[in-house]
Image (spheres, rainbow, N blue to C red):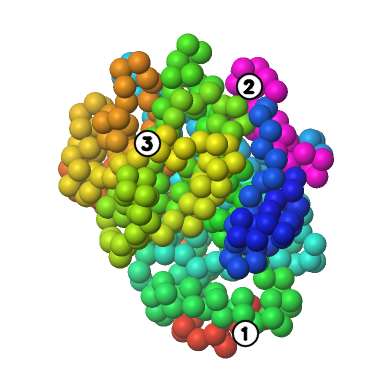
Amino acid sequence: MNLYNIKDNSEQVSFAQAVRQGLGREQGLFFPEQLEPLADVDALLDLPLAERSARILSHLLGDEVPAAKVSELVNAAFTFPAPLVKLKDNTYALELFHGPTLAFKDFGGRFMAQCLAAFRTNDKITILTATSGDTGAAVAHAFYGLEGIEVVILYPKGKISPLQEKLFCTLGGNIRTIAIDGDFDACQALVKQAFDDEALKKAIGLNSANSINISRLLAQVCYYFEAVAQLPKADRAKAVISVPSGNFGNLTAGLIAKALGLPVKRFIAATNANDTVPRYLKTGQWEPHQTVATLSNAMDVSRPNNWPRVEELCRRKGWALETLGSGMRDDAQTRAALKRLHQLDYLCEPHGAIAWDLLGEQLAEDEVGVFLCTAHPAKFKESVDEILNLDVPLPGPLAKHAELPLLSVNLPAEFARLRAFLVG
Ligand SMILES: Cc1ncc(COP(=O)(O)O)c(C=O)c1O
């Protein structure tokens, strides 16, 4: 697989290089050179998730990775289902939260971890990441137990929920966690300092598990196929998929699936009040506002990193940007949507509820709608409990970790101390 840097097309890399490097020159995103449609999509849709996903990824990766190796990576990464749940005649929820950390990030995070382990060139790799809560869990669980890869996760002491902390600070093994005396910005600043320290980078094989890594996106393509595979055959070409969007990686993956021949009629980009993209699609003006905090906090992004990939793909395929549906929901509308969904007997959380509400608004009578449920309701327990007056029970993985002792060490927000810890 060849990829080029969207900002500087002369920079061309292989998939393995793109996985290791993350970003190109000038912070440019890598994008696949070839996106040839798959040969027999109907037959593919009849296969089980892991087998189908291995074929899709093998088609994308081409000669660079042998098909048997791709199957091995996929089988190790996709160990959980993505069920499509029917709400009423023409609406379905695609549940992407059945992985170990209960969010769609498990698909991309776990595949990336497998790829990094397979393509590493250094003797040792140290993944250093700062988290404000959820990314830490997905990264920790994805890399847990992978030979030759050390993971160090920094988080602001006392500023993440006790449950979030338990989910990734109780693993041990190759996962080390540090509670930093400071806020999330202080943690991020320490990570940046580490990446600026060339000697340290070399000594410990420093790498990041950045969310704009192409391996994460390609893994996400697979669950769009899984959604359509579970629809009745007659409904497939009428499918409209509503995607809760923040950084727009999820939507990019959906559009790549369509470019590969997945029969999806159209997509809806659903945002919260941080609605740079819906406004841009309406007015043609790219005018990011100050980011505001919302109930769907994982989508509190006003300058979405992956948007250039969406534009690049639409340009290459000749798809007019205006054909992309979009819309936003503020917190009051999100609360109301969550309540209405609950009355329909479906327990959701704020991100999925936004996608559902916009789908309901924009779905035509002859269409079939799918909205993506990107996180388990228990991950947003505080707001879900308050809005719905419930006490959402913790699912297995969370409940298990809640009982285990914390293994974190505590450090001040001083780079010298972090450096000593990493080298030691
Ligand atoms: C629960 C949840 N839903 C939706 C999103 C938005 O996905 P994307 O940033 O790929 O647009 C995120 C992103 O972190 C998320 O955590």
Question: Please, what is the three-letter code of the amino acid marked with disc 2?
Answer: Val
- Secondary structure, mark 1, is helix
- Asked where in the image residue 363 lies, by quadrant, the reply is top left
Q: Is residue 32 magenta?
A: no
Give the magenta range.
39-65
Q: Residue at x 30, y 42 (%)?
A: 327
Q: Residue at x 47, y 11 (%)?
A: 234
Mark 1 lies on residue: 420
Position of residue 409 relative to residue 348, above or below, is: below
- Asked if residue 423 lies left or right of residue 296, the reply is right
- Which residue appears at 47% of the width and 75% of the height? 187
Quarter-of-image position of residue 297: bottom left
Task: Please report the residue visible at 51 percent of the width from the left and 36 percent of the height from the top.
Answer: 319
Tell me: is circle 1 under 8 Å from ligand 1.
Answer: no
Q: Does mark 2's beta carbon lie closer than 8 Å to ligand 1?
A: no
Q: Main secondary structure of the magenta part?
A: helix
Q: Residues within 10 Å of mark 1 (few under 14, many from 20)?
A: few
Residue 23 in sight in this render: yes
The residue tagged with tag 3: helix, strand or loop?
A: strand
Q: Amino acid at mark 3?
A: Gly
Q: Which mark is residue 325?
A: 3
Crowding near the residue tagged with mark 3, few <14, some 14–19, many ≥20 C-alpha atoms within 10 Å: many
- Give the camera-side residue of 362 and 19: 362
Camera sees residue 151 = no
Q: Amino acid at mark 1?
A: Ala
As measured in the structure, the alpha-carbon distance from the residue carrying label 1 to the one carrying label 2 is: 53 Å
Q: Note whether 423 is above or below 210 in the view shown.
A: below
Q: Residue 271, image x and y in percent?
A: 33, 47
